[in-house]
Amino acid sequence: MAKEITSREEDYSQWYNDIVKKANLASNSAVRGCMVIKPNGFALWENIRDQLDRMFKDTGHVNAYFPLLIPKSFLSKEAEHVEGFAKECAVVTHHRLMNDPDGKGVVVDPSAKLEEELIIRPTSETIIWNTYRDWIKSYRDLPLLVNQWANVMRWEMRTRLFLRTSEFLWQEGHTAHATKQEAIDETIQMVNIYAQFAEEWMAMPVIKGVKTANERFAGAIDTYTIEAMMQDTKALQAGTSHFLGQNFAKAFDVTFLDENQKQQLVWATSWGVSTRLIGGLIMTHSDDDGLVLPPKLAPQQVVIVPIPKPGEEIDEVATKIMADLKAIGIRPIYDQDKKKRPGFKFAEYEMRGIPVRIGIGKRDLEKGEVEIARRDTKEKTMVPLEGVAAYIENLLVEIQDNLFNRALKHRADHSTEVDDFDTFKKVLEEKGGFIYAHWDGTTETEKKIKELTKATIRCIPLDSKEEAGKCVFSGNPSKQRVIFAKAY
RNA sequence: CGGGGCAUGGCGCAGUCCGGUUAGCGCACCUGCUUUGGGAGCAGGGGGCCCCAGGUUCGAAUCCUGGUGCCCCGACCA
C-alpha cells in the first residue's frame, strides 16, 4: 500500500491532490490560484504539446505568437464574448512602481496610470482578429490557419491543480476562411483531431458532440466538444472547437475581396486544449498507488531497478538493455542510486506512473532472466534476457490498449439511457455517470434540471441517431438523446 | 460576495484555554556504521522574525485590538 495517498474511495478530491503532489507534477505557488508545474508535470505537457503540434502541422496549420496584453476596448467589440469573460479578467492599470513615501517597500506610482487599461488575455480572439484585419485582404490570403502555444489567465473563484487554475497553458488555434462550409469543416476537423489525440495518445475515451446554447463559448455560433468520464463518473470537458461564424469578422471589420471582386466577411473558427488534459489523464487512469501513465505519453517508459543494488554485473546487463530499448525508440532510465533500497524504488516509480519496471537481481541473472512488472495491472513476469526488448515493445502497446479499454468499459458501465425524471434523479444519485435522455431543446429546461440535480448537458453527441421521444423533464417532443452528467 | 476554519523549521502537527526554564514531535534533510528481492535500523547533526502591526506585562507563540494571507462549503468556470 502506498504511503500517504488517500484512497479514491475515502476522498476522491484528496486522492487527486495527493497524486499531483506525490508524483511531483505540480504544486501551489505563492500566487493564489496559480500553480508551479514541476519537471515531471512539465515533461508530460511537453509530450502532449509535441504530439498535438505535429497533428496541427500535418493538417496545414502554422504557429505564431500574439501579445499577452489586450487593450480593454478590444474585448468589448464582440458583445457576447465580453459578457462571457468580463467577470474573470485581470486588468493592468499602471506601468510603474515607486518607493513607498511612508516607509518600506514599493507602491504603485499613481502618475503612471495607463490611459487605456490592458487585459491579461483570457483567450486571444480579439487581439488576433484585430491583427487579422491587416493580414487578410484577398481570397488568396485564405484560409489562414494559425495556432499559438501560450498562457492565459482567468480569475477563477475556486481553483484546482491542472483542472482549473487562474493561469494555465494551452494552445489556441484561430483560423479564417472564405466560406461558411470551409469554416465548419475546419471546426469539425479539429474536434476530430482532439478526439483522436485523447483516445490514441492519452488512452482516454471521449464523446464528440455539440454544446447547447447555454454551454456554448462566448461569441461562438457552435461549440464542439470532447467529453471524457473520470473514475468518479463525473464528466470532464477535455477540448473545444468553435465555429465562430462571422461574429469576429464583423466586430473587427475583417473582409476580403473575393474572386468576383466583391467584399466579403471572413468566416472563423477557434479551438483549444489546455493543461487541464493532465488532470484528465490523472483521473482517467491512476490508482491508489499513484500515477498511471499511458506509454505513448510517459516521459520515461521503462525503469530499470537493480536488486539489491548496482554492481558490475548488473550494470553491464542494464546498459545492454538500455541500448536495446533506445535502439527501437523506447525511453528507459536506469536507477543507479546506491542508497535507496529496492522496495523504496518500486513504490517510488509506481507513484510516478512509469509503465514498465525491469528488476535485475543476481538470482535472476544466474537463470538468465529479469523480472518485468507492468504498472497498469501490477503483474510481474520473468523474461529471458535475450527477449527483453521485444517483450517490452509489445508490452507497451498492450498497456496502452489495456488502459484505453479499461476506461472505455468504465464509461460503458456508467452510461444509462433514462426516460423519466424520477429515474433520472435516481440514476444520477446512485450510479452517476453519463445519462442519455431526451431533451426538449430549451435553455429553460436545461437550467431547471441543473438547479434540481446539478447535472448539465455535456453535449449532443455527433453520432447519436435520430429517435423520437419525450423530454425527460417537460415531456415535450424530442428528436434525439443528449448526455447529462455532473461535470468538473 | 455569504457561511465556517486555519496561520508555529521544507511538509504534517502539538503547545495557546490557565503567560514563566533552552518552543516540542513525526516525516523530510545532512554525516557515519550496519543493511538492501516491496517504502531499513542505530547513533550523531543542521534548520524557527511562533503571519504582520500595535498594546498589556518584570516577562507574550500564549492575553487584548487592528490588519493580512490561506483552506473548505455555496454562487461562477476550460
Image (cartoon, rainbow, N blue to C red):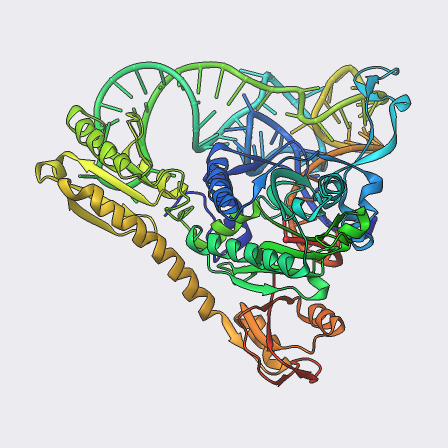
* Residue A112 seen in render: yes
* Residue occupying image coordinates x 61% and y 57%: A187
Left or right of A361 in this view: A482:
right
Image spot of residue A441 (x, y percent): 70, 75
Left or right of A158 in this view: A82:
right
Left or right of A80 in this view: A228:
left
Q: Is residue A136 above or below residue A411?
A: above
* Residue A287 seen in render: no
Front position in the image: A371 or A89: A89
Q: In this view, does A167 lie above or below A258?
A: above
Q: In this view, does A372 lie above or below A112?
A: below
* Residue occupying image coordinates x 65% and y 31%: A30
Q: How many marks?
A: 0
Front position in the image: B66 or A171: A171
Image spot of residue A444 (x, y percent): 76, 72
> Which residue is at the far front?
A260
Image spot of residue A77 (x, y percent): 83, 48
Front position in the image: A424 or A275: A275
Left or right of B49 in this view: A26:
left
Q: Quadrant of the C terminus of chain A?
A: bottom right
- Where residue A237 sits, quadrant-wise, is bottom right
- Where residue A359 sits, quadrant-wise, is top left
Image spot of residue A274 (x, y percent): 58, 46
